[in-house]
Amino acid sequence: MVPDNRIAVCPGSYDPVTNGHLDVIGRASLMFDHVVVAVVNLPIRKVTTLFSAEERVRFLENATRHLDNVSVEPFATLVVDFAHAKGAKAIVKGLRAISDFEYEFEMNQLNRMQAPDIESVYLMASPKHSFLRSSGVKELATFGGKIDGLVPEEVAARLLEELGR
């Protein structure tokens, strides 16, 4: 059954956005009429974020500017409530490894209890991004590692400002 609209939400903390995130967002933009990149304002799994929600939104807006059917917004509610507010019928997430699958499987079950009308769609990470984690990029930046090609240039510059030793 094809939904009346083909809107999807791609939620995440994006702290910082990586090229792996952008790969999933770009691929989702080919599958849906509109993709709302939902930036978690205050993530539960992290005590604090390196970048403010406003800065993370700006990074994503700049990095997805070429995708006409993608918008970026912060949110601070249940993802299914945000999806309903946007008229979305799908939540799109990327998967890199078994550990991602285990967490996302649990989240999918909880989301389906809250909103059975919203489907979860999982895109496997592209091979060149399958190792890429925001926390790994931050660690590299902290110790002067090369982060070119892992994040957008604007993000790389800000990471080095914030974390470079």
Image: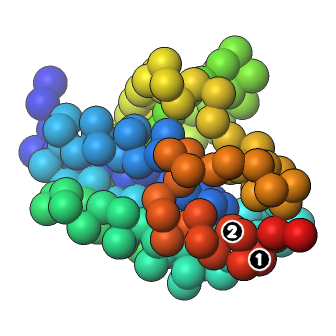
Location of residue 45 in the rendering, given as x and y in whole percent from the top left corner? 81, 54
Location of residue 1 in the rendering, given as x and y in whole percent from the top left corner? 14, 24
Residue 153 vertical position relative to residue 110 in the rendered view, above or below: below
Residues at circles 2 and 1 in contact by the CB criterion of under 8 Å: yes
Q: Is residue 38 left or right of residue 6?
A: right
Label 1 packing within 10 angstroms: few (<14), some (14-19), many (20+): some
Work out whether residue 62 or residue 164 is closer to the camera in this orientation and state it.
Answer: 164
Quadrant of the image containing the C terminus: bottom right
Q: What is the total number of numbered labels drawn onto the structure image?
A: 2
Q: Which residue is mark 1?
A: 162
Look at the numbered disc 2 and give the secondary structure of its residue: helix
Give the residue drawn at x 35%, y 72%.
62
Q: Which residue is mark 2?
A: 159
User: Is residue 118 visible from the viewing direction of this image?
Assistant: no
Give the residue drawn at x 76%, y 49%.
145
User: Is residue 71 visible from the viewing direction of this image?
Assistant: yes
Q: Marks 2 and 1, Cα distance to the nearest angstrom?
A: 5 Å
Residue 3 vertical position relative to residue 38 in the rendered view, above or below: above
Q: Quadrant of residue 42?
A: bottom right
Q: Quadrant of residue 71?
A: bottom left
Look at the numbered disc 1 and give the secondary structure of its residue: helix
The colour scheme applied to this rendered structure is rainbow
Q: Amino acid at mark 1?
A: Glu
Labelled disc at residue 135: none
Location of residue 15 in the rendering, given as x and y in whole percent from the top left corner? 66, 62
Q: Amino acid at mark 2?
A: Leu
Location of residue 146 in the rendering, given as x and y in whole percent from the top left corner? 68, 48
Work out whether residue 18 or residue 43 is closer to the camera in this orientation and state it.
Answer: 18
Residue 132 vertical position relative to residue 115 in the rendered view, above or below: above
Give the residue drawn at x 44%, y 24%.
126
Give the residue drawn at x 72%, y 78%.
161
Label 2 packing within 10 angstroms: few (<14), some (14-19), many (20+): many
